[in-house]
Amino acid sequence: MVVAAWGLKVDRWSDRVVLAGFRIAAFLVVAACLMRPGLALSSAVPQRNVLAVLLDDSRSMQIADAGKDRRVAAEQRVFGDSTALVRQLGDRFALRFFRFAADAAPINTVADLHASGTRTDIAASLESARQELADVPLGGIVVVSDGADNAAGDLTATLLALRARHVPVYTVGVGRERFDRDLSIDRFELPATTLAGAGVAATVSLGIRGVAGDSAALTVEADGHIVAARQVLLPAHREVVDVPLRLPPLPAGTHTIAVRVAPLKGEMVTENNDAAAMLRVRPARERVLYFEGSPRYEFPFIRRAIAGDSGLQMAALLRSAKGKFLRLNVLDSLDLIGGFPTRPEELFRYRALILGDVEASYFTGDQLRMIADFVDRRGGALIALGGRNALAEGNYGGTPVADALPFALDAQPHRADTLAVTLKVHPTDAGLVHPALQLGTTLTQDTARWDSLPAVTSVNQPGTVRPGATVLLSGRSTPRGPDRPVLAVQHYGRGIAAVLDIQDSWLWKMDPRSPVEDQSFETFWRQLIRWSLDQVPDRVEVTPVPARVGPGEPVTVEVRAVDSLYHDMNDASVTAHVTSPSGHTVDVPLAWTLREDGTYSAKYVPTEQGTYQLTADARRGNDTVRSAVGGILVDGRGADMERAELRTPLLERIASETGGKYYPIDALQQLPEDVTLTESGIVAHESRDLWDMPVVLLLLLLLLGAEWGYRRWRGLA
């Protein structure tokens, strides 16, 4: 039997634990009161601050999934002039209403909402509203939207700026997070440019909601004319399916490429069944330099394959003996007279470099750095071939060139194998849809053509594939052997580098079992080089952001300008020339953006529907360079219906990163109270004592009463 501290007899261990718990809790409450805790509150002074209310006015707000209403109707019903919510907010703040889509603009009444904007840019709209109210005490911002942001605005920077100014954003979600039945074009991938004379590979991503098992008709139009069509069986258990497309060769110029999928019966939304992009077809022949260190069969076969392509002009350089070179298809008698270029301006006039079987020791240290700069700074394409004196076997490991390659070469010198490894090559999953490897007109034909090609050989150990690289071709020495990479590509700086670590791709042409008319070898090499050239920038590059807008919506015209050595120019005079569909040309001066070297930008607002042509020139001293022609597509459809389901995570992120809160549109009862607790604008600071509150006394009495009651219940009193 044990005697407790308060003179009580306690017989059991469990009783002692319970009683001690009540007493410790009571002691902690008393101790907390002695520390005199308090709560500091900041609240907006009534009618001394402005509350901005941004209402989404984009086309996605036309969708009728907010109960029985369209989304815009739900906005108007909840935030109408005489609603209870607006009255409560108006008692605390001076309200300023804005409509927003691509940008924010003040409105007098929610009746001015028409859900007609073709693009949603929440970042630009928040910044526009903040600047509009820069001279007044801004207590907070309320954003009412479906979150279908499809612009390229820097949302992170905007949210950081609002948080730094202690301006909370309260987001209100409208619509449904998932449609019951819908087929949409979520993404349309198309190269910005391509060379004339060749087909174009594109990819369409279809979003699937409740239509699995149906068949969809997909068509592609170029300038209003159907150029491709296919039927797509929508798979089960998947919400997105990628559909590769092949477009036929198009004439030189700027083309509007539209892809459409026929609406299915019972779709909730049909406005998201189409997408469009601009494609520039370049007419000029683009120069490629091919350098081989010694005569081998690969050299003449690759040359002949490229010679039949009207869009490519290959200068070939073959080292026939020490200090002697065979020069083919050079510009003049002095071109490459001393062998491989020794100055950047000589090498940088080419857009692609094919590096054959030549050892690293042939090049000087400056030349090796120049090759790396050709990819990194100039933005050129480098294709390194396999061979006994190439890659790691050519002692390239540890050189600047090795840093650009998609394989991590061993810095220790390798000896080429005495016997070559025979490889049966096949495309990887990424290679099957890659434009460089499409040998047929369909995926089935592609697979069959690659399976029919003869085996080739390699004498190289390629090394580990870098994390950012993509393997397009793999090879096996035996039918059940492990795969080893054969062709890999990666972005390096502004350019692209590829490694093809085989030494005799010409066997795909000359194998006795290959049909005479088989063009797989030629097709592969032409497409590989063409694809690499599509990524190479000019000295002046003009880009509209976004490239598709509605009339009256702003476009940011961005220009990147470099000098003859491809160093960024920050002191150039840059002007964009915008030609409307009616033929009227406007000159738009651009200013250096400060955030990135060599980049200039300005706003332009197109008003006509149709295709605008866009060029730019950069002048510095006597050096004037003009860009190629780009395009802006202006129509009433825009991109706002893409992925138009309610994006709750995005709206929650906006609220949490600025100190606000997210609400569904049918649960706004707490919004008037929450927006009052702010540190922005004119606020009143209040300090409340937490220890001197009736609830604390009640808690203490409850604990003591519970302890006494337990003792009575257990017969210990």
Image (cartoon, grey):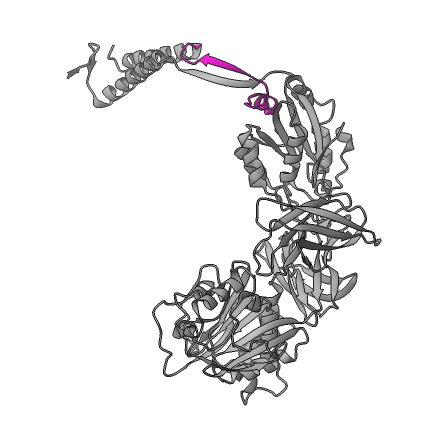
Identity of the residue drawn at 71% across and 50% down: 575
Residue range (magenta): 668-693
For the point 62% across and 39% down, which residue is it? 123
Q: Which residue is most to the right? A: 582
Q: Is residue 347 magenta?
A: no
Measured from the top left, where is residue 515 in percent x and y?
Answer: 60, 87
Front residue of 424 and 353: 353
Q: Quadrant of the N terminus?
A: top left
Taking depth in this image into account, of 667 and 586 the one nearest to the observer is 586
The number of numbered badges drawn on the structure is 0
Kindly give the residue lying farthest to the front in the view shown.
Answer: 622
The answer to whether any part of residue 652 appears in the image is: no
Q: Name the image quarter holding the C terminus.
A: top left
The reply to whether residue 186 is visible in this rendering is: yes
Image side of residue 318 versus residue 34, left or right: right
The outermost residue toward the bottom is 512
Residue 692 within the magenta-colored segment of the rendering: yes
Above or below: residue 334 compared with residue 687: below
**Observer-nearest of 644 and 635:** 635
Please state the horizontal and vertical placement of residue 67, each as a whole percent of the image: 69, 36
Q: Quadrant of residue 430?
A: bottom right
Residue 596 vs residue 555, the one in the foreground? 596
Quarter residue 711 falls in: top left
* Left or right of 484 on screen, residue 439: right
- Residue 314 drawn above or below residue 23: below
Q: Locate residue 28, reporting x and y percent.
A: 32, 17
Q: Is residue 513 left or right of residue 47?
A: left
Q: Residue at x 27, y 15 (%)?
A: 714
x then y, percent, for residue 546:
68, 49
Is residue 497 toward the left or the right of residue 75 in the image? left
